[in-house]
Image (cartoon, rainbow, N blue to C red):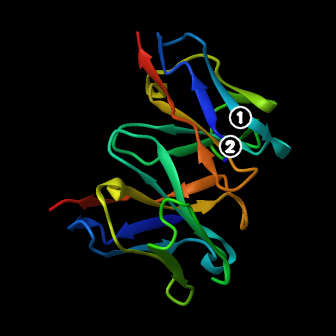
Amino acid sequence: EVQLVESGGGLVQPGGSLRLSCAASGFTFSSYAMHWVRQAPGKGLEYVSVISGNGGSTYYANSVKGRFTISRDNSKNTLYLQMGSLSAEDMAVYYCVRGLVPAGRAFDIWGQGTMVTVSS
Amino acid sequence: DIVLTQSPGTLSLSPGERATLSCRASQSVTSSYLAWYQQKPGQAPRLLIYGASSRATGIPDRFSGSGSGTDFTFTISRLEPEDFAVYYCQQYSSSPVTFGPGTKLEIK
C-alpha cells in the first residue's frame, strides 16, 4: 500500500523552529519529487515546497523562502521540512504529498497531516 | 501567480441532484493542468480529477471535469450522501502551484 506518514508537529513558540518528517512506503521513493502543502485552521490549501527525486532541486513558496528547508533521505524513504522563524501565519496542518507521476504536480497521495501550532 | 476563483462559495443541494462547480483562472492554464480535490472534515484532500478531465484511480464516473484555458467545470452527475464536502481546484501549469478557495457542497 502506498502510504505517507507525517510526524514532528506540535506546539512551538513564535520565532522557534520545528522539523517535520514524512515516512514513505509502498513506492520507489527516490523516483518521485515530493511536496509539502499546508492548510491553516478553517482555511484553504497552500503550496509550500517541493524537492526533486534526487534532492538536487528545490522550490519554495515566497511565504516560506529563507525560513524553511526541504530535504530528503532516499536511503530512509523520508522527507523532511525544517521550519524556522515561525509565526502565527505558519500555524497549519502540514501535508506531505506525492505527485501523480514522478515529476507531476497533481497530488494523488497525501499523508494524514501533522499540526503545527505557533503560540506563546 | 495564477489566481483561481471558485464559484459558488457554497452550494446547497439534495442527494440525487446534479452539482456543477466552476473554477476560473486569472491566466490561461496551459495543457489543461488543472485538478480537482475533495476534502471531508478532518481528512486530507483526495484527488478526483487531473488534466482537467481525467479521473484519478478508483474515482466513480459520476465525477467529471471539463474546460480549458481559464474556465473549468467540475460536475457530480447524481449526488450521493458521501459527496457532501469541500471541493478545491488546483492549477499546476505554472509555478507556484495554486489552489482555489474551495466550494462547500452542503446538504439542502
Q: Residue at x 69, y 56 (%)?
A: B95
Give the x, y percent position of residue A13: 20, 67
Per the model, the C-alpha gap separating discs 1 and 2 is 6 Å
- Residues indicated by labels 1 and 2 sit on the same polypeptide chain: yes
In this rendering, would A108 be left or right of A31?
A: left
Look at the picture and state if A81 lies above or below B59: below
- Identify which residue is drawn at 72% across, 60% down: A104
Any mark on residue B26, and which?
Answer: 1
Left or right of B95 in this view: A1: left
Give the crowd class for mark 2: few <14, some 14-19, many >=20 residues within 10 Å.
Answer: many
Q: Is residue B93 visible?
A: yes
For mark 2, give the secondary structure.
loop
Dot label at residue B12? none
Count residues near mark 1 (Cα–Cα under 10 Å), then give few for <14, some for 14-19, many for 20+.
few
Q: Is residue B66 visible?
A: no
Residue A103 percent coordinates (x, y): 73, 66
Residue A75 appears in which quarter of the rendering? bottom right
Point out which mark residue B2 bears.
2
Residue type for callout 2: Ile
Q: Are marks 1 and 2 in contact (CB under 8 Å)?
A: yes
Residue B81 at x, y percent in the picture: 44, 21
